[in-house]
Image: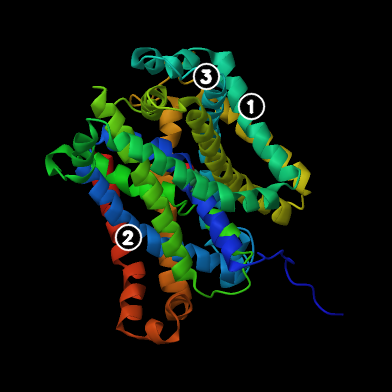
């Protein structure tokens, strides 16, 4: 009898669907909500420069590595390591770390997803038209103060995810992605045109692109590194899972570059728009997670067709958030179905039922649990910080070492192609993975943790 492959897998219908789905997973709240606010918290220009350097020098090489592990492993994030290195390989713990990380991220990400859903309904009912900045500024805080409302929106967001995954709508959503992601760029460009007419645009550009080293701390460098991982979903099982549905390892490098470029452009666009508003209306830049929710509505209030634009904007952001959280769900569900022999529906329900209670801790961080802090961080901030700045970089170091030392020169040839892979560039890339990349991450880590 012919032996069955370890898992028979569905494959992407084309390279483009793979790239679009991966980009859809990368572009999300990290670009539109998190990047602007952590840039504001870390003083602007220098932070952006370090962030861009981290994307190019560390995150993109690791992205390619992860794609290669998926494409070669042809399985979920844990099994993929065993398929490459052998049964019960200790490297499988790297996959487990990634899955744990992505589960923790899903819990607080869904809380922010809930805020976006709430703002979408506020936009629909015309709440951002004819409002003054002061009134808008307090809208999110008002919602934060209400524990039941926070938990309800969290529930709504998680349920939406579960319905899409269990109902098999994922393929359809991915097709929608091909239209909605360019639409997001278009609406950001439209907002950019409006923002460019505001008096604060010069100050915004200077803030974002004029590096002032004195404003960046060691903790800020760690934030930049961590965020380069977060925004590209490095070391979080997602890319292994998505790439495991590829049939070959062709042009991984090009796919990774395209994803990173698209992701970065969206983040920078969002940043310019948001800071132009902040500087034009005399708002503080370091207000934290509320930044986009207090700046953007002011622009909507001051533009023609503001109602329509605000609805479209929050709709597209909700979609971007959903395609990202779905990728987290998918990584967890894929592992549960393949290794725990669960059906897809049961696995989805299990993930949702586990993420919801943990999410509640984050949802209550802004109200009843706001006093529960560790080193000044609420449960929400702590989950974000620990996953972004500890889990993802640790996983990234592990992946670089795995590809560099275990898969070795063969991996480089697969990534860069026969000619380039065997050239001096190929050797340089191999050694980048083996030593400088992990060492740089560790150095930033130690400095950042020491404060
Ligand atoms: N990168 C996505 C964003 O920027 C979030 C995301 C999706 C993510 N999947 C992930 C983050 C896995 C970390 C790990 O919004």
Badge 3 is on which residue? 126
Disc on the earlier residue, 2 or 3: 2
Mark 1 / mark 2, whichever is N-terminal: 2
Q: Residue furthest right?
A: 1
Q: Nearer the viewer, mark 3 or mark 1?
A: 3
Quadrant where the image shows the N terminus: bottom right
Query: x, y percentage for residue 184?
Result: 48, 44
How far from the left and from the top, in percent, is residue 423?
A: 34, 85
Select label 2 or label 3 by which is in front: 3
**Residue 137 point in image, percent of width and height:** 37, 17
Distance of mark 2 from mark 3, alpha carbons?
41 Å
Q: Residues within 10 Å of mark 1 (few under 14, many from 20)?
A: many
Q: Is residue 370 above or below residue 266?
A: above
On the image, which quarter does residue 431 sit in? bottom left
Task: State the CA–CA distance, disc 1 to disc 2.
Answer: 37 Å
Q: Is residue 135 left or right of residue 115?
A: left
Look at 45% across and 81% down and name the residue there.
417
Q: Residue at x 59, y 27 (%)?
A: 154
Q: In which quarter of the view is residue 374 placed? A: top left
Label 1 close to label 2 by CB (< 8 Å): no
Earlier in the chain: of badge 3 and badge 1, it is 3
- Element type at mark 3: loop
Indicate yes or no: mark 3 CB to ligand 1 under 8 Å.
no
Disc 3 and disc 1 in contact, CB within 8 angstroms: no
Mark 3 and mark 1: span between their CA atoms?
24 Å
Vertical side of 34 occupied by 57: above or below: below
Quadrant of the frame with the C terminus: top left
Task: Name the residue: 35% across, 40% down.
Answer: 192
Closer to the camera in the image, 89 or 261: 261
Q: Which dot marks residue 56?
A: 2
Q: Residues within 10 Å of mark 2 (few under 14, many from 20)?
A: some
Can you identify the residue that label 1 sits on? 155
């Amino acid at each position: 009898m012919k032996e069955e492959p370890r898992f028979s897998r569905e494959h992407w219908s084309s390279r483009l669907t793979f790239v679009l789905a991966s980009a859809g997973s990368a572009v999300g709240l990290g670009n539109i909500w998190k990047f602007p606010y952590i840039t504001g918290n870390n003083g602007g220009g220098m932070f952006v420069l370090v962030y861009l350097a981290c994307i190019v020098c560390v995150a993109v090489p690791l992205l390619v590595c992860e794609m290669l592990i998926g494409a070669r492993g042809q399985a979920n994030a844990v099994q993929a390591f065993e398929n490459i290195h052998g049964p019960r390989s200790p490297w499988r713990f790297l996959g487990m770390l990634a899955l744990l990380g992505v589960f923790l991220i899903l819990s607080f990400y869904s809380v922010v997803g809930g805020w976006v859903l709430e703002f979408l309904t506020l936009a629909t009912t015309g709440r951002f038209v004819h409002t003054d900045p002061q009134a808008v500024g307090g809208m999110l805080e008002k919602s934060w103060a209400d524990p039941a409302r926070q938990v309800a929106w969290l529930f709504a967001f998680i349920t939406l995810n579960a319905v899409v995954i269990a109902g098999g709508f994922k393929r359809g959503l991915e097709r929608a992605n091909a239209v909605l992601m360019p639409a997001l760029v278009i609406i950001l460009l439209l907002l950019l045109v409006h923002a460019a007419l505001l008096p604060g645009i010069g100050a915004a550009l200077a803030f974002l692109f004029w590096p002032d080293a004195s404003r960046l701390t060691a903790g800020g460098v760690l934030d930049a590194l961590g965020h380069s991982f977060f925004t590209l979903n490095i070391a979080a099982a997602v890319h292994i899972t998505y790439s495991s549905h590829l049939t070959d390892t062709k042009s991984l490098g090009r796919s990774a570059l395209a994803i990173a470029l698209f992701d970065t452009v969206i983040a920078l666009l969002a940043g310019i728009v948001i800071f132009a508003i902040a500087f034009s209306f005399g708002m503080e830049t370091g207000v934290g997670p509320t930044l986009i929710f207090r700046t953007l509505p002011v622009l909507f209030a001051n533009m023609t067709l503001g109602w329509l634009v605000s609805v479209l904007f929050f709709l597209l952001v909700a979609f971007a958030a959903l395609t990202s959280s779905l990728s987290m769900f998918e990584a967890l569900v894929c592992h549960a179905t393949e290794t725990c022999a669960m059906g897809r529906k049961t696995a989805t329900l299990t993930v949702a039922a586990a993420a919801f209670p943990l999410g509640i801790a984050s949802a209550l961080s802004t109200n009843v649990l706001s006093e529960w802090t560790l080193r000044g961080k609420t449960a929400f901030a702590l989950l974000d910080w620990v996953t972004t700045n500890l889990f993802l970089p640790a996983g990234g170091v592990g992946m670089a070492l795995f590809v560099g030392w275990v898969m070795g020169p063969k991996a480089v040839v697969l990534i860069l192609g026969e000619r380039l892979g065997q050239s001096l560039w190929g050797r340089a890339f191999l050694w980048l993975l083996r030593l400088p990349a992990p060492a740089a991450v560790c150095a930033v880590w130690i400095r950042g943790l020491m404060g």
